[in-house]
Structures are given as C-alpha cells and as structure tokens.
C-alpha cells in the first residue's frame, strides 16, 4: 500500500509542478491583455462568440470569470456566456496538457468550434423561445494595476498556490490512488469496455453538471489509461464548467441553470453525433 501511495504522490508532484508553472504564466498574460480583449469582444456581436470561445480554451478559470463579469455588466450576451462555458475545461486543462498534450490540444480546438456555434445558437434559441435572462447589474468597475508585488501576493500566492493547487493536489492524488486500486483489484478495462458507449457518453455529460472541475479528472485519467474513448472525454470536457460557473450563482441561479442546460444539451448532441459516425 505504501508503495502505491508513494508512486501516486510522485506522479502527483510531477503533474502539479507543470500545472503551477502553466497557471502562473497564463494568469499573467490574461491579466496583462484583459483590456485589449474587452475592447475587441464588445466591438461586434459576432466577436463575442469567437473571443469568448477562444478565452474558454485557455486553461484555468480566469477566462470564465472574465466573461461572467462582462455578462453581469451587460457587455456580452447570454450566448457569449454559453460559448465560454462550452469551451472551458477549467483547471483540468492544465492536467490534460501535462498528461495527454496532443489530445488536449485537439479537445481545445473542437471545444472552441462547439463554443462558437453553441453561443450563436443559444442566443437564437433564447430569443425564439422568449427566455428571460437576468438584467445587468450596475457595478462600478475598478481598474486593477498589474504590478509585481500585487501579482505575487494576490494572484500567485492567494489565487494559485493557496486556492487552486491544494485542491488540485488532492484531486489528482486521490484519483490516481483510486484508479490504481481499481485496476489492480478489478478488471476495469473489461468493465468499461462492456458498458454501452452511449451510456458512457450520457454519464460523462451528466457528470459535467457538477460545479467543480475535479470529477473531470476521473475521465482524463481513464482516457490516459485507454479505458474510455475520445468521445467520452470530449463530451465531459464540453459539458463541465468547473468552478468557473460558481460566480454566476451569486448573480443569478436562473441563468446558471440555463447555462448548464445549454452546455449539457450541446455536449450530448456532440456525443451522439460522434456515436453515430463511430468515433
């Protein structure tokens, strides 16, 4: 048992070091260029879907928080909000890059396309059906100057090291232990391969409803072990919003539910399409 724990701990540390470096780099770049991004995204309606989807493909949660902030101020539409949630993979994107980089890049590319199309469709459906989303709130926006001390204290320490990495460490470590245990004591490959693919796709989409990115790690590790196909991992990635959706809950529970319905339905549509063509 100790050997298994040490192996899992060693693997977890390797992944966490890569994840931490990527998180720091990406957070800095996003903060540095956020004003230019905001200017472009509000320039034309179509820009919303494209830029929101591209932002969502960037690993981490700050892109989702950024779009939610614009949405609550009435600067982007519900479709842009849906687009970023469809394309985001949350913190697990860092882990996918560390463990399955080629597959991760493919998933990011597909998610961007799904995000753009889904965002456009979401706005059309909202108007057609007459769904009333919440009105923007009037909140004063304070410009945040990015300096080294602020970045080290508030972003690297308070946000990345204190808030994200401990939870990611536990999720990775415990998931590695659980999968190792299951693979040694059960014929996990036969069990997973024996399940109907369509059932796995539906299950992956429903797990995405959980407002936490950790459960997605289970599918990442199963895929890395060859236990589930690409379609299942893709569906779960599209469906899950991670904790990027949590700030929206404080603004509107109704809009949060609407977003989850749209992302789950779009994920299922992609999954069923891949199922029908045999992927």
Image (cartoon, rainbow, N blue to C red):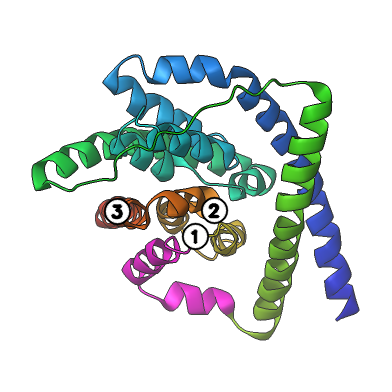
Name the spot of residue 259 as percent of width and height, x first.
33, 50
Considering depth in this image, is 256 or 232 the residue closer to the camera?
A: 256
List the residue tagged with mark 3. Answer: 258
Q: Secondary structure at mark 3?
A: helix
The residue segment tinted magenta is: 188-211
Q: Residue at x 52, y 27 (%)?
A: 141
Q: Point out the image quarter for the N terminus.
A: bottom right
Secondary structure mostly seen in magenta is helix
* Mark number displayed over residue 180: none
Alpha-carbon span between mark 1 and mark 2: 5 Å
Q: Secondary structure at mark 2?
A: helix
Q: Secondary structure at mark 1?
A: loop
Considering depth in this image, is 144 or 92 the residue closer to the camera?
A: 144
Q: Are marks 1 and 2 in contact (CB under 8 Å)?
A: yes
Considering depth in this image, is 239 or 155 the residue closer to the camera?
A: 155
**Counting residues from the N terminus, which is met first, the one under dot 2 or under dot 3?**
2
Circle count: 3
Alpha-carbon span between mark 3 and mark 1: 14 Å
Residue 50 drawn in magenta? no
Q: Residue at x 67, y 68 (%)?
A: 175
Q: Quadrant of residue 147?
A: top right
Binning the other alpha carbons within 10 Å of mark 2 as few (below 14), some (14 to 19) or many (20 upward) gives: some
Determine whether 66 is above or below 91 in the image: above
**Counting residues from the N terminus, which is met first, the one under dot 1 or under dot 2?**
1
* Mark number displayed over residue 243: 2
Q: Are marks 3 and 1 in contact (CB under 8 Å)?
A: no
Q: Are marks 2 and 3 in contact (CB under 8 Å)?
A: no
* Mark number displayed over residue 211: 1
Q: Is residue 239 left or right of residue 215?
A: left
Q: Residue at x 82, y 23 (%)?
A: 148
Q: Is residue 199 left or right of residue 24?
A: left
């Amino acid at each position: 048992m100790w050997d298994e724990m040490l192996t899992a701990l060693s693997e977890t540390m390797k992944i966490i070091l890569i994840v931490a470096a990527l998180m720091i780099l990406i957070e800095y770049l996003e903060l540095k260029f956020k004003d230019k991004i905001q200017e472009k995204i509000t320039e034309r309606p179509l820009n919303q879907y494209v830029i929101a989807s591209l932002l969502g493909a960037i690993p981490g949660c700050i892109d989702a928080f950024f779009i939610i902030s614009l949405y609550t101020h009435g600067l982007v539409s519900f479709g842009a909000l849906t687009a970023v949630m469809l394309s985001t993979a949350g913190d697990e994107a860092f882990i996918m890059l560390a463990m399955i980089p080629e597959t991760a890049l493919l998933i990011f590319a597909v998610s961007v396309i799904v995000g753009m199309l889904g965002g456009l469709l979401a706005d059309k459906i909202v108007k057609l059906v007459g769904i009333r989303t919440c009105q923007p709130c009037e909140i004063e926006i304070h410009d945040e100057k990015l300096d080294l001390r602020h970045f080290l204290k508030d972003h690297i320490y308070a946000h990345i090291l204190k808030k994200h990495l401990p939870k990611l460490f536990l999720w990775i470590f415990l998931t590695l232990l659980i999968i190792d245990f299951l693979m040694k004591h059960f014929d996990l490959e036969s069990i997973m391969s024996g399940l109907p693919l369509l059932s796995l796709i539906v299950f992956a989409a429903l797990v995405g409803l959980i407002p936490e990115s950790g459960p997605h790690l289970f599918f990442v590790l199963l895929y890395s072990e060859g236990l589930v196909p690409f379609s299942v991992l893709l569906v779960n990635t599209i469906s899950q919003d991670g904790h990027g959706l949590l700030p929206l809950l404080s603004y509107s529970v109704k809009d949060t539910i609407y977003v989850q319905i749209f992302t789950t339905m779009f994920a299922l549509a992609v999954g069923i399409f891949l199922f029908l063509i045999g992927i």
